[in-house]
Amino acid sequence: MVNCCGLLTDKKEPVPLQGIQVELEVKDHVATVVSTLNYENKEDKPLEAVFVFPLPGDAAVCHFSAQIGQKQVVAEVKEKQQAREEYDDALSSGQQAFLLEESEQSPDVFSLSVGSLPPGESASIRLEYVTELAVQADEGLRFSLPAVLNPRYQPQGGEGASVQVTSVPASLVPYSLSFSAQVSSPRPVSKVESSSSLEPLQYLNPEQTQATVKLAAGHKFDRDVELLIYYKDAHQPTAVVEAGQASAKPGTLMGDPVVMVSLYPEFPQAVMSSVASCGEFVFLLDRSGSMDCATNNSKQQETRIGSARDTLLLLLKSLPMGCYFNIYSFGSRYEHIFPKSVEYSQETMEEALKKVKEMGADLGGTEILEALKHIYRQPCIPSQPRQLFVFTDGEVSNTKQVLDLVKKNSSSHRCFSFGIGEGASSALINGLAKEGGGHAQFITGTDRMQPKVMQSLRFALQPAVEDVSITWDVPKGVSVTVLSPPITAIFQGQRSLMYAQLSGQSSEAAEGCVTVKYSLAGHPSKDQLHFGLKPAGDTGLTVHRLAARTLIRSLETEERENKRVKEKVVELSVQSGVSSTFTAFVAVNKGDGEAIKGPLARRNIPTPMFCGVMTNSYMSTPQMACCAMAPARYMDLQRMAPRGASMVASSLEECDDCSYSDEDSSDCWAEVQGAIPDQAPTDPLLQLVSLQKASGCWVLDPALAAALGKTSEEVENSKPASVNQEVWATSLALIWLHGFKMDAQEEWELLAMKAVSWLRAQNAPCVTECVKAGNALLGCSVQKDALGL
């Protein structure tokens, strides 16, 4: 079952949350976020306001307080049940109380309860967290302020109660958002980009190492706010030693200095230029109803499932001959194209592509766990390293169960994950990659999925780093306690981040050294970083809190029923002031005022929900608002097939309740599939790619000529007399790619490498003649060397 999303506007209830102010401070690759939530009770009765909202999955929440008039009440971290009892006791005695707790199913969902807010009174809630910024494929650092929290699917028989999400379409959210950011780094800030409109970047010093930026005026709170921050010479190893808390006991995590080390391994070019010709590539595609939503608010934007189909086309064309592959998809059930992974060939590729074209978002809910269990039960193929690619919008509630399973099977594969669309769970997407030793990517706003996925395929085709070991060299009298889990995956140009506690005494001039050794393509390699042990100035305990969060997360993935582990997590959480699964922040206003009288009215604060393009007329049908498959499909059908649209509307109006089931989705969609015209890819690049053979070549036929924008006669008449037809066709395709699609090179680079390898294997003597004739035909000026020939 899935949680229904209540429409507050239908209930005609005022929303006590008036606005949210967010101030972001980025120091190098660490972010501190301060959110101020302003509440006002405009009703004539006391309120309890409950707000369920998203945060980054790896955020360390480290401060929670409330300002009521001139009085500030600072929350304490306590064991979760104790905190809940204190909150309830305070409300029952007429006191104001505030409770902030993390979801037990997913660490990126928090619940904030503001209790006993009297009529006419205001309160400002201050929430602070720190988080690491992930490195993107283009070397940018990604910060995301989650705004969208789509209802999370609760699997049948799942553990624990599902998170109750009160959502409205993003355009109807009744409170405002203001956002500003300050960026500083030892290296110049070259640019800051965003999926939202920004005011111009303002530099604060001549060296351009400090800058500020704000959201442009008129920003609508209808999407996650994403910033991409770029530094000059970003790939520099760094180490920050932070002094412990003066009031904390020496020998404890908060009392001792902590070092944060960032390493950027650089692999030899000879190794990086080679591409693996083996591997078992397993693609797992989300086909739940929500995958039929658009990836952003644009009415012209394709659906998530459509983008995923196009991406699978590119992936299948880019796989090396000699590898193995299979494609799984999941919803309320899971399916696979082949009973087990098959060898990559023209026949198996064509069969897979035929099935991919038929895939819709028609499998109901989001039961990813059972699909993963089935994949892990399949025996690995000798000498074919397993690479798992997971495509999902991440709308699941059993995140921790899924991550536990991936971690348990981490030795058998690498996992590359892709979060599609607004509201994708950062805890799930980042966690899959982290536990599976792979790389995570998010596709939001106007992002194209294809270049990000192909970047991850390049990572997957890199030689796997093996035998990773880390050693610390520190002066006598200093000991090192590593707080981070062992590093199992290293990729070219990607950051490896480690935390360690430093105990003991050393001179101010003393140095430490960390060495990472590993084997790459059979060759031993190492990276080394020397750093001073003298702690940096006041850093606000940011490094300590991130280290505590890392250690807490590691402990939480151990046996959850282990009482000693839970006690250790609670102790560490209380000591560091950082949230965990087993703790919560609680604050009680024990003022001298009179007790607040009267029964509390509960008000659920709505969160933006993104699911396709929603219009007022669309939202007038309550059943359609709650059906995850409806929005994008219905709007697309209105444009493409009015008869199909009326079928969907009629079917949905007959629903007895708002629950969304696999049967509802499949039956509705089966009825209207015939109303949708069969459409070939309209993207010229995808048209050309779809014609490539598994071996890497193209054949000379009318379809190729059309993709190149020429007639069959023009293509055939331009062919040099002595040139083989397939050599000519393949040469033309490469020339067209280099001549007209260099801006999308990341998408076609791997399949072009296959084409070049095929041409070389033909020992064709007339390649120069082909290039000359191809340039003349297509109107290009591509050099033979540029093609790699």
Image (tube, rainbow, N blue to C red):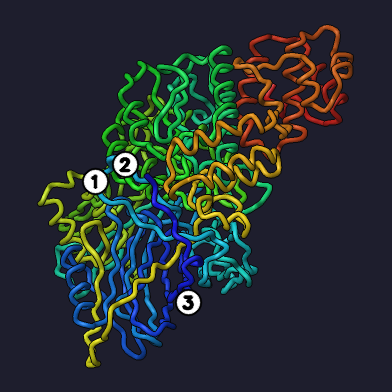
Q: Amino acid at mark 3?
A: Gln
> Quadrant location of residue 732?
top right
Q: Are marks 2 and 1 in contact (CB under 8 Å)?
A: yes
Q: In the picture shown, does residue 507 fall above or below 513? A: below
Q: Which residue is mark 2?
A: 403
Nearest to the eye among marks 2 and 3: give it.
3
Q: Is residue 468 left or right of residue 697?
A: left
Which mark is first along the chain, 3 or 1?
A: 3
- Identify residue for label 3: 18
Q: Do the CB atoms of the residues marked 2 and 3 lie less than 8 Å apart? A: no
In this rendering, would 710 be left or right of 608? Answer: right
Image quadrant in which the C terminus is located: top right
**Front one among 743 and 75:** 75
Task: Estimate how packed mark 2 is, as few (under 14), some (14 to 19) or many (20 or more) residues with alpha carbons within 10 Å.
Answer: many
Residue 267 visible from this viewpoint: no
Residue 54 image offset from top left, x and y in percent: 41, 59
**Judging from the image, what secondary structure is the residue with disc 1 in?**
loop
Which numbered disc flags the more N-terminal residue, 2 or 1? Answer: 2
Q: Looking at the image, which residue is at 63% across and 63% down?
A: 197
